[in-house]
Image (tube, rainbow, N blue to C red):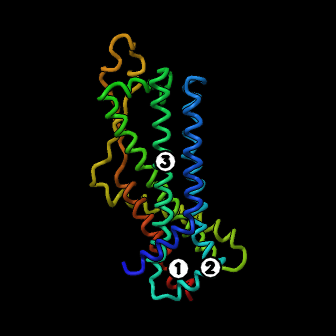
Amino acid sequence: MRGFGQLYKKDLESIGLMTIILGLGIALWDIYFYTRIGQWKAEIAVMPTILPFGVIIFWLVLQAIQVYRHEWQTGGIQLLLALPQPGRKIALAKLAAVLTSFTLNLVVATLGFVWVLRAGALYTGGVRLFNIAMEAFFQSRAATGWLLQIALGAWFTYWLAGLSIVVVFQLVYNCSRLTTRLRFLVGLASFFVIQWLIGLVGAIGYYVFSWIPDLIIQLPMDTLSRLDPAYGLAEAPVQTAKIMIDSGIVLGNLLGVVLLFIITGYLLQEVLEA
């Protein structure tokens, strides 16, 4: 896409410093709790490494708004809208920049969490998540395979949630720019309307895509945690439970996110530009 690269680079540079600071902060946070293993109870050393995942979401909301807010404060948005670039390309560049930063910090947080979790589980064997002994997962190939599948599924779900958050709040902010007064109230009202719209599209998707097979997620049951390590815990088979997720609702919500992005591009090109 002609011109997209320059737009993307500019937006990425605008949040690059905060991305680096957050990534370093997460790394230092995990390193500190890694050094506590053997001095503290294993679970106490591991659990705080989950906190960065919440911080990343909070940061994501701020950056989703900041890439637009910076343009409006400096007057750069008028220049962008005056260029022969469609609104959807401007919106896509800002969305891609925020998601790139989000993905990088998510990778750092994930690696840090797994690093500390593995060290704590193998050092004392006292770390338990969801009532499952983590030591068994890191000692058994079969269990490690299941753990990897669960982690990838959770990571992708978390990323999709981040994508949805960025699209929603960028549209909310652009809606608030439609007026010069009471922008906070306009943005708040827009947020609730957008949530209703996503729910409506998700409900429609439930019927339209009902013919698509449901998603099946297999999770290990807590029977693994009751086995005695003295009797071959590392080689114990992993029993699983199946969770069914309606594909129609998922696809409907994804289409809702796409619709919100299209509305954002339309506002930039046809409404805010005017």
First reached walking from the N terminus: tag 3 or tag 1: 3
Taking depth in this image into account, of 242 and 86 the one nearest to the observer is 86
From the image, state whether disc 3 or disc 1 is nearer to you. 3
Secondary structure, mark 2, is loop
Q: Would you place residue 74 above or below residue 117 in this image?
A: below
Q: Provide the residue designation for mark 2.
A: 178
Circle 3 crowding by C-alpha within 10 Å: few under 14, some 14–19, many from 20: some
Q: Amino acid at mark 3?
A: Val
Q: Would you place residue 67 above or below residue 102 in this image?
A: below
Which residue is located at x 30 percent, y 20 percent? 235
Q: Position of residue 52 (x, y in %)?
A: 57, 45
In the picture provided, is 169 more to the left or to the right than 106?
A: right
Q: Amino acid at mark 1?
A: Leu
Q: Would you place residue 89 above or below residue 195 in this image?
A: below
Which residue is located at x 38 percent, y 39 percent? 150
Secondary structure, mark 1, is helix
* Residue 267 numbered tag: 1
Q: Amino acid at mark 2?
A: Leu
In the picture provided, is 14 more to the left or to the right than 95?
A: right
| Mark 1 and mark 2 residues within 8 Å of each other at the beta carbon | yes
First reached walking from the N terminus: tag 1 or tag 2: 2
Taking depth in this image into account, of 67 and 206 the one nearest to the observer is 67
Farthest-out residue, top: 230
Circle 2 crowding by C-alpha within 10 Å: few under 14, some 14–19, many from 20: some
Q: Provide the residue designation for mark 3.
A: 108
Tell me the quadrant of the picture where the C terminus can be found.
bottom right
Which residue is located at x 49 percent, y 39 percent? 113
Q: Position of residue 173 (x, y in %)?
A: 60, 70
How much space separates mark 1 and mark 2, taking CA atoms? Answer: 9 Å
